[in-house]
Image (cartoon, helix red, strand yellow):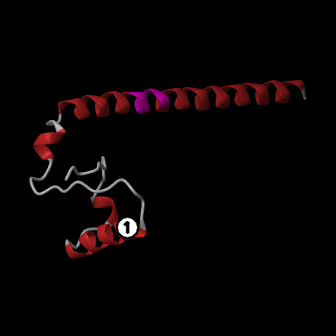
Amino acid sequence: MIDALQEGLKVAILGMGVVFAALGALAFVLRLFGVFLRRTDHMQAPDDATTPQGSVAVQTDTSPELAAVVAAVLAALNCSEGSVRVTSVSRADK
């Protein structure tokens, strides 16, 4: 009976050790991904080089008209929701 208990404890400790090591390896791999992704963000061209020349400044209110205009433009360009990202909205000087 004591031998079975000792064998069970050994298996349980070994199993927990394997799981802990696997979680540590996974955390290390995720940290490496974060390092590489931050490096590629810094290597990209500046934002002004990728800004389309026909960009338009939009008012900063969150009115339903603004949402309707954005939805209409996306529908006209046949774009999906995730393909366009608004980085900043600023008031145009007149």
Q: Position of residue 73 (x, y in %)?
A: 24, 70
Q: Is residue 46 above or below residue 77?
A: above
Tell me the residue at 22%/73% (across/down): 78
Q: Quadrant of residue 81?
A: bottom left
In magenta segment, residue 87: no
Q: Is residue 64 left or right of residue 72?
A: right
Residue drawn 36% across and 28% down? 32
Residue holding disc 1? 67
Secondary structure mostly seen in the magenta stretch: helix
Work out which quarter of the rendered image holds the N terminus and state it: top right
Tell me the magenta residue range: 27-31
Helix, strand or loop at mark 1: helix
17 lies above or below 50 = above
In the depicted structure, whether residue 48 falls above or below residue 10: below
Residue 85 vs 26, above or below: the answer is below
Q: 36 and 77: which one is in front?
A: 77
Q: Residue at x 28, y 50 (%)?
A: 91
Which amino acid lies under the numbered mark 1 shown in the image of this protein?
A: Ala
Residue 93 percent location from the top left of the image = 21, 49
Residue nearest the viewer, comparing 36 with 71:
71
